[in-house]
Image (cartoon, helix red, strand yellow):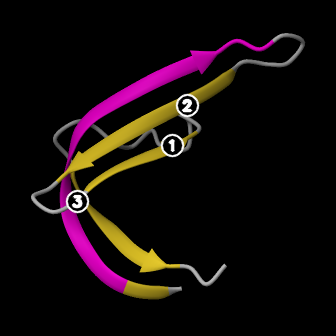
């Protein structure tokens, strides 16, 4: 991957959702929305992986391009 830029972004919103599926365990997702003047990004992952984030935190977002 080629790194294009690193942006400092403030977390604007965190949303947790749980989807019930028949005959399977529940699917959980945490959506973390960032907002800056130039970029808005939404990440999706399992809530227990993304637990250390809070609204108002400033984080580094690495923007890169994959060759896949």
> In terms of secondary structure, where does tag 2 sit?
strand
Main SS of the magenta part reads strand
Image location (x, y in percent) of residue 10: 17, 50
Q: Which residues are magenta?
A: 4-21
Mark number displayed over residue 44: 1
- Label whose residue precedes the other's in the sequence (3 or 1): 3
Q: Is residue 22 above or below residue 40?
A: above
Q: Check whether the beta carbons of the residues at disc 2 and disc 1 lie within 8 A of each other.
A: yes
Circle 3 or circle 1, nearest the eye: 3
Quickly name the residue at label 3: 39
Would you say residue 19 sits in the magenta stretch? yes
Specify few, some or many for label 3: CA neighbours under 10 Å numbering under 14, 14-19, or 20 or more.
few
Q: Residue at x 16, y 41 (%)?
A: 56
Quickly name the residue at label 2: 29
Residue 66 as seen in the image, left or right of residue 58: right
Mark number displayed over residue 1: none
- Alpha carbon distance from label 2 to label 3: 22 Å
Camera-side residue: 1 or 14? 1
Image location (x, y in percent) of residue 31: 43, 36
């Amino acid at each position: 991957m080629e790194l294009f830029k690193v942006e400092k972004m403030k977390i604007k919103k965190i949303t947790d959702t749980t989807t019930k599926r028949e005959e399977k365990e529940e699917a959980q997702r945490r959506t973390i929305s960032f907002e800056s003047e130039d970029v808005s990004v939404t990440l999706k992952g399992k809530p227990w992986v993304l637990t250390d984030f809070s609204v108002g935190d400033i984080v580094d977002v690495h923007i890169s391009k994959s060759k896949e």
